[in-house]
Image (tube, helix red, strand yellow):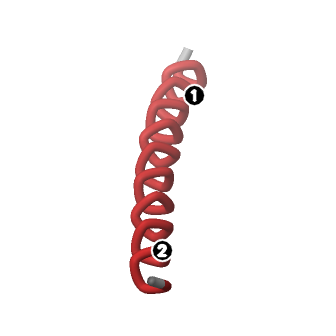
């Protein structure tokens, strides 16, 4: 039971990290495009 709860928390954290990384990569892409102009 504890393993299932830990897995759920891990999956939630993982999804938030993926969202955060996606946002950061989009920011880096826009900054790179802006600097190359």
At x 49%, y 85%, the residue is 36
Residue 30 vertical placement versus 2 (above, below): below
Label 1 belongs to which residue?
A: 7
Element under label 1?
Answer: helix
Crowding near the residue tagged with mark 1, few <14, some 14–19, many ≥20 C-alpha atoms within 10 Å: few
Residue 4 vertical placement versus 29 (above, below): above
Return the x and y of residue 31 as percentages of the image width and height: 40, 75
Return the x and y of residue 12 as percentages of the image width and height: 46, 31
Q: Outermost residue, top direction?
A: 1
User: Which of disc 2 and disc 1 is earlier in sequence?
Assistant: 1
Residue 31 vertical placement versus 13 (above, below): below
At x 50%, y 67%, the residue is 29
Decide which of 33, 2 is in the foreground and name it.
33
Return the x and y of residue 11 as percentages of the image width and height: 54, 31
Decide which of 10, 26 is in the foreground and name it.
26
Marks 1 and 2 sit apart, C-alpha to C-alpha, by 39 Å
At x 44%, y 83%, the residue is 37
Label 2 belongs to which residue?
A: 33
Quadrant housing the N terminus: top right
């Amino acid at each position: 039971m504890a393993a299932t709860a830990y897995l759920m928390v891990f999956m939630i954290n993982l999804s938030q990290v993926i969202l955060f990384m996606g946002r950061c990569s989009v920011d880096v892409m826009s900054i790179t495009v802006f600097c190359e102009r």
